[in-house]
Amino acid sequence: MGQTTAEKIFAAHLRDEPFPGTRVLDIDRVLCHEITTPVAIADLEARGKDRVFDNTRIKAVIDHVTPAKDSKTALQAKMLRDWARRHDIKDFFDVGRNGVCHAIFPEKGYIRPGFTVIMGDSHTCTHGAFGAFAAGVGTTDLEVGMLKGVCAFREPKSIRVNLNGALSNGVYAKDVILYVIGQLGVNGATDRVIEFHGPVVAAMDMDARMTLCNMAIEAGGTSGICQPDMVTVDYLWPFIQGEFASKEAALNEYSTWCADADAAYDKLFDFDISKIGPQCTYNYKPDCVKPVTEMVGTRVDQIYIGSCTNGRIEDLRQAAAILKGRKIADSVRGIVSPATPVIFKQAMDEGVLDIFMDAGFCVTNPTCGACLGMSNGVLAEGEACASTTNRNFAGRMGKGGMVHLMSPASAAAAAITGAITDPRDY
Amino acid sequence: MKKVFGGPAIVLDRSDINTDEIIPAKYLTEVTKEALQPYILEDLSLGDFDPKGALLKNATVVVSRENFGCGSSREHAPWVFEVNDIHTIIAESYARIFRQNMFNCGMLAIELPKADIEKIIALEARGALQVAVDLPAQTVTVTAGSAQETFSFEISPFDKALVEAGGWVEFADARY
């Protein structure tokens, strides 16, 4: 019997099986941010165990509220900063060099096919785009990860999602994943890995694959996983060229993590993506998904383009293509947050930020901020936001606010009219 | 430290209660568990549910439906229960990260089939719910007025070991 990608990764990282069905894995990357890590740091200190298992495999960033908005967030940042310095964690990104965790860590080349990755953040599943097993965990799992370099999981069962056909005009990775979540339901993949296959994924660049895997958690999935291929190798090449004689050699090695043809899946879904148009959410659960065409005219007060889901350069380019030469409606505020300083600068150099600013957008620094209603664009009660983020829970972006999740192109179209709009009209 | 399980229960009769409802993100700027205490279930959308009400204040057990604790990985969700002395949750199913966070803190996230949850919710009509947990026997006994019913639950040996050890840090520190 063949193996899924997750089964191969688990087998290669198995440290212990303390009980049947429980796999304790060695972890290649323990990622940290300032919201969920400080309590772990304080607990380790209180236990007299202020140590780290390997300061080269731990990466840290201040991203959720940055620069600090008040004394409390300043303290969280300080606790992470002091800890990183104390343990000589070189890959620590502070104000000015910091970006949204699931954008900046891949950008630095830290995630490789076959890796195990944990972080105290549910959207850690993003990194499965590289053919890694990447799971969001709580602070206690993170704490043990920091101290011991291990994490426990149940046996990995996988759901195979075949994305057949091709993306139509105006349809992006965000539309695909919203559609998939709508089909699977918010707990359709609980305790499962979602393994993405098919020509639609094969044709996606890494930015799009990260968008796809980012929202696996919204269907309950432990990790999203794409199959490593030459697109993966091309993205990683600047970081791995010293390790391989050629890209083909890298591909040969990375391909060993691809699922076997006879791997066993818990469930199998085939979706004809050619048939779907732009998608967006209604109501307060991420599986409440409709075609944008059925939501056209729904009023919004704010447009938010950014986050670990859709704050990468491709996302900004897609929105800018629609905004170019146009103004946003008087009735809305537009906010764009490039997810990392590199993306920010790239968008600046390409003139993408000029387009946003000329259209009337506010350009903010890289941060998670508004996505979870912490800073930089919190909604007032009764307001609605067309957002490229990942969660439309009641109150997520501000108490009493409504969030409509959609692609950057759809969000840009909504900015122009002040209501949900089919991006294919532009 | 080992937790106390069972006691007076409150029913949160809805599926998909998410971590933003359990503890809104604006309170994630706290760096101690104790500071979260006043904000429990502050944003829960559930009829006339009152997060400051006596029923929640007295409860040490929460009973709910499917996919409890979905959304964020924030352990602040189990912590806000922990610092309000709620160490037992009984639901049809959980989001993975929330469930693991509960066991990692040495607390109980008990899964019961839909039919059993329905029975417990029906018992509420008979009087205030009182839950007794027998972890070795893997049963919960629910009393309401003169009515009483016992339900068996499954728990993985690993999760049981975490509860017995007092949590994952204790377990992992002793073993790795």
Image (spheres, rainbow, N blue to C red):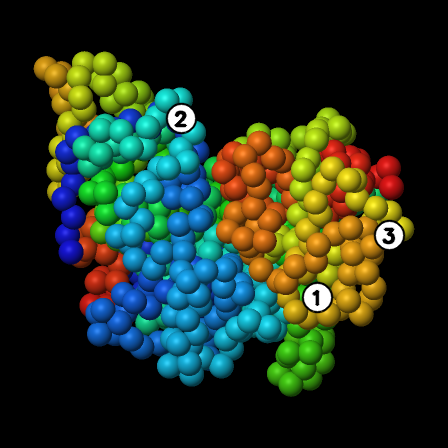
Q: Looking at the image, which is closer to me, A68 or A345?
A: A68
Task: Residue at 27%, 69% (x, y): give it.
Answer: A44
Asked if labels 2 and 1 touch by Cβ distance under 8 angstroms, the answer is no
Q: Earlier in the sequence, mark 3 or mark 1?
A: 3
Give x and y (percent) for residue B163: 20, 50
Secondary structure found at label 3:
loop
- Callout 2 amino acid: Leu
Q: Chain of mark 3?
A: A
Whether residue A252 is visible, yes or no, is no
Same-chain check, marks 3 and 1: yes
Q: Looking at the image, which is closer to me, A388 or B63?
A: A388
- Callout 1 amino acid: Phe
Give x and y (percent) for residue A190: 45, 42
User: How far is the residue under mark 3 from the one under mark 1?
Assistant: 18 Å
User: How far is the residue under mark 1 from the one under mark 2?
Assistant: 41 Å
Mark 1, residue position: A344
Instruction: Give the crowd class for mark 2: few <14, some 14-19, many >=20 residues within 10 Å.
Output: few
Image: A316 above or below B64 = below
Whether residue B111 is visible, yes or no, is yes
Circle on res. B6: none
Image: A95 above or below B158 = below
- Callout 3 amino acid: Lys
Q: Chain of mark 1?
A: A
Secondary structure found at label 2:
loop
Asked if labels 3 and 2 touch by Cβ distance under 8 angstroms, the answer is no
Task: Residue at 67%, 30% (x, y): give it.
Answer: A290
Mark 2, residue position: B46
Image: B106 above or below A252 = above
